[in-house]
Amino acid sequence: MATPRVHTAEDTTTLVETPDGLIACTHLWWSEQGPTQDPLAEDQAALERSRARLLELKSSLVVIGHGAPFRPNPAHLLIPTALGHRPWFTHLRFGHADERM
């Protein structure tokens, strides 16, 4: 499935039909907790449309490139940092972990 503008216009999500349901391998999310705004997305609106399209498929599992797999639900369209989750990139400084945090 084409999921353009995740990082580039050529990005895709690989869909695998299994006895346990549809599995999606994708970069549409960094982790189950977010961030909602992808700091590397070329087009945030296109990213959000791609996320919505994938959620419509009712995948049983989403395997992401930067975190643990998760079971998707509609809340994954809007992942609020107000839940106490701190986006991973707030810990970075010049591309390396800031050890003072």
Image (tube, rainbow, N blue to C red):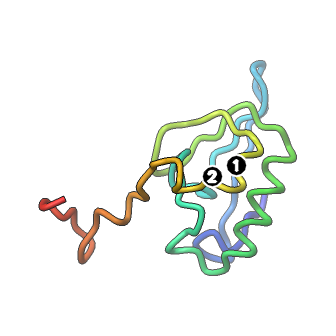
Where 96 falls versus 72 (above or below)?
Answer: below
For marks 2 and 1 on the same chain, the one whose residue lies earlier in the sequence: 1
Q: CA distance from mark 2 to mark 1?
A: 7 Å
Question: How many other residues sit within 10 Å of disc 1, few (<14), some (14-19) or many (≥20)?
Answer: few
Q: Looking at the image, do the residues carrying marks 2 and 1 touch, with CB atoms under 8 Å apart?
A: yes
Q: Amino acid at mark 2?
A: Thr
Q: Is residue 24 left or right of residue 21?
A: left
* Residue 42 placement (x, y as % from top left): 61, 80
The one of 34 and 66 positioned closer to us in this rendering? 34
Where 53 falls versus 70 (above or below)?
Answer: below
Q: Label 2: which residue?
A: 26
Q: Amino acid at mark 1?
A: Thr
Q: Is residue 82 left or right of residue 14?
A: left
Where 29 falls versus 75 (above or below)?
Answer: below
Residue drawn at x 74%, y 37% as measured from the top left:
16
Q: Label 1: which residue?
A: 14
Q: Residue furthest right?
A: 56
Residue drawn at x 59%, y 57% as measured from the top left:
27
The one of 98 and 19 positioned closer to us in this rendering? 98
